[in-house]
Image (cartoon, rainbow, N blue to C red):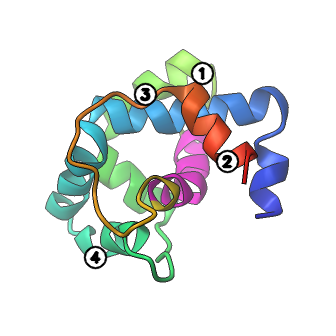
Amino acid sequence: MGMFDDLLKGAAGAGLVAMAAKVINDNGGIGGLMEKFQKGGLGGVFGSWVSTGQNQPVSPDQMHQVLGSDQIAQIAAKLGLPADQIVAQLSQFLPQVVDKMTPTGQVPQSQQAVEPDALYKMFTQS
């Protein structure tokens, strides 16, 4: 996982994990987020993250289009980062998070909130 191991070290890693958890939780879990991507025309891309195959990339512009300016602005304000940096990081990290949270290629049925600490452990204890 190399690059992501480096990203997840320290405060920057905690911020990435918190950002991903917020996006998932604010959109109704993995299933709700998948629906949002489907409505935004990126259902196939999101589906590749859930499946056990290769993850398709998503651009920062696509991420911004799907999540919307309001949600990006809320995350940016919470983390004290510029919006363009938020979408750039999410476009790189969120596919990995969804992939890790769906190891069997199935979307979890439960709407249980994603805890940042638990998500962080998923990536740091491989």
**Residues at marks 2 and 4 touching, judged by CB atoms closer than 8 Å:** no
Q: Which residue is mark 2?
A: 123
Give the Cα distance between marks 1 and 3: 10 Å
Q: Is residue 112 left or right of residue 38?
A: right
What is the three-letter code of the residue carrying label 2? Answer: Phe
> Which residue range is magenta in the image?
84-98
Asked if the stretch drawn in magenta spans residue 97, the answer is yes
Q: Which residue is mark 3?
A: 73
Q: Please provide percent x and percent y for residue 57.
A: 50, 73
What is the three-letter code of the residue carrying label 3? Answer: Ala
User: For the residue labelled by badge 4, is the local secondary structure a helix, a strand or a loop?
Assistant: helix
Q: Which residue is mark 4?
A: 44
Which of the marked residues, 2 or 3, is nearer the chain's N terminus? 3
What is the three-letter code of the residue carrying label 1? Answer: Leu
Instruction: Identify which residue is drawn at 56% across, 37% down.
Output: 119
Instruction: Using the rendered image of the protein, determine whether residue 72 is visible from the camera's viewpoint.
Output: no
Q: Residues within 10 Å of mark 2 (few under 14, many from 20)?
A: some
Q: Nearer the viewer, residue 33 or 85?
A: 33
Q: Nearer the viewer, mark 2 or mark 4?
A: 2
Asked if the stretch drawn in magenta spans residue 79, the answer is no
Q: Is residue 57 above or below residue 118?
A: below
Q: Which residue is mark 1?
A: 79
What is the three-letter code of the residue carrying label 4? Answer: Gly
